[in-house]
Amino acid sequence: MAGPSDSLLWLENAKFQIENLQEWKEFTVNLFDAVQQQMDENHVNFFTDLSETEKAFVLQRAAKAIRGGELHNALMAQINHCLEEQIYSHVSREMQDSQLPKTKSDLVLGHLREGVVHLLEKRPDLKGKLHALFNQPLPTPLRGRAWRLYLSNTKARMEYLSQVAVNKAKSSLDREISLQCVSLLSAEETIQHLKDNTVAVKAMRNALSYSHKFQKLSASPSDSECLLIVPLVQAVIDTSLPTSSVDTVSALLVEEYLTFIDLRPMLLRGSPDQSSNDVSSVYKDIALLVNQMDQKLSTTIQRIYSEQADQPEESLQRGVQSLLQPVMQRLFTGYLQMKTLLYIWDQYIIGLDQPAYNCLPAFGLTFIMLLRDHLKGCHSPREAEAALKTHGPVLSIQEFQAVINKHFFRDLYSLLNKEDMSPLIIHDPTQVTQWSHATRTAVLPRTRPQDRRQAREERDMLRRQYMEKIKEAENQRLIREEEQKRQEELRLQKLLEDTRETLLVQKSQMEEQLSQEKQSRYELQRKAEEQIAGLQAEIRRLRELSRRSPDRYSLESLTAPPPSEHSRTPTPPRSRPLSQSPLSQRASPAVGDDTHQTQDERGKTAAAV
């Protein structure tokens, strides 16, 4: 590998700083003495006489012998300090030099992920250190690297590439397998996002087709076997470059899938092994755990499957097997959303190097425990199995983590880290050959084997006492936390009651205020109506008075009527009457003879006017 990139410069600086520490020099001297002791016990004269595997074994035993000592603890403290100092300095400079939208925590976690991936690429034998991440979802780049390390199979990869070169990597049922892949990706809601990815679909078909040919099967692969490749496809697609070809992705997928199929336990196999005693014993153990941990769930399963057995214990076992067998055969694919599914696969794959470790029963039991409330309403086995498929995708990673931490973490973690928890190899510096030890330290007085045995027993007793103190302190801490939680619940309950009383008082006050406002509004409305009625009566009275008054005329009564036909026809002059009344004489003006005739004014006679 070429030199480290700028993003990993902090790791190289930390390495250089650690190598110059005094604690590192003292630790290497102590490690050399432990190696020499291992060689003396095995009658090996020179370290170079050992093979590479034997060298690694001797170094591992020597390191385990001095683990937990003062030098080891001091060195670990200095290493942690150096790593923190270098990475935070690197992140601070990075934030000053560029405008990044990420926070400081995101940058630190990103660099840590890159550093772990870099170390795994450089030292694949360190994959066992991933056991410390049990019950945690692996980051996407780390997941891709970890799965490749645990599912590596160079021979299978090279055979596939050679078959591709001569165009003999496809099965005779390649078309049927392709249609089956498309059908499954379209039918399962939790994996439908992959059907639109052309590279994923083609790589999935190529891997299944080659696996079918490699295993020399006559029938098409079952749906469960096809679905087992889906998480591998997702992990490969997530870590592949956008420019990666279908052949590259297919080769990696074939390598991982063939290894996974070869390593899968009986619990994941299909119908031929369903009736095996090993599988039945696993489900029997799960049924016993259900009865111990969740009595309500046990009663619910017994009620649903009571018709399939006479005894409650037998009905519980058959119910657990009927519920979990389809889930286990496809390893939760189709029953959980993709993030939760990959989290469970992380826990399974990082334990492939430990034969005694098997987390699948624990996760299967956790799965049905989390769906307890949905199973209560089921009345038949078909409804119960449908409830798992319907409500399973709603479950989150945090829900699984909580149940695993509560019931299974200690046992599974101890199985996963069995080598680290094995009895320590005692490093006795007085038994190192004198020519190497005396040149560096003062010669210790020789002791008898009985004295050394007694000293070891005393150290073991002190170690046990120390562990008991730790357990006692942990129990006391849990008791204090429970008491604090109970006090907090009481405080919140009292606060809730006080709040409820305050709200009731405020509600009664507001209701009383509302009734008062309604009464005042009613009074105001009644007074307004009385005033309106009085005004209307006054208006009517005034109108009556206006009608009865004779001296008043309206504007309409003074308007002249239109001219009539008679007024339009000119009238012949009439002679003046011989005699007029005095009133007529007063009304008619004294004019000449030619103006004594009656004239129309705008078509109206004087009499009309």
Image (tube, helix red, strand yellow):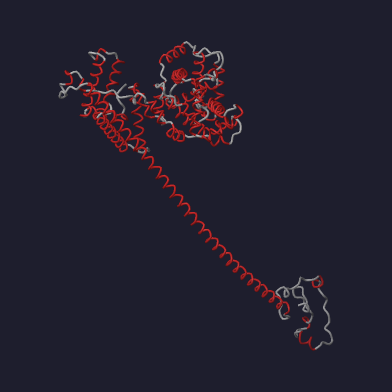
Give the quarter of the figure containing the N terminus.
top left
122 with respect to 482 (left or right): left
Percent x, y for residue 246? 47, 20
Percent x, y for residue 495? 45, 52
Of 320 and 354, nearer the camera is 320
Residue situated furthest bottom in the rendering: 582
Kindly identify the residue that appears in the image at 31 percent across and 15 percent down: 53
Of 278 and 243, nearer the camera is 278
| 559 to 508, vertically: above or below | below
| 268 to 94, vertically: above or below | above
Kindly identify the residue that appears in the image at 63 percent across and 72 percent down: 531
Of 52 and 252, nearer the camera is 52
| 410 to 261, vertically: above or below | below
Is residue 32 in view? Answer: no
Of 454 and 403, nearer the camera is 454
Q: How many marks?
A: 0
Is residue 587 in view? Answer: yes
| 459 to 539, vertically: above or below | above
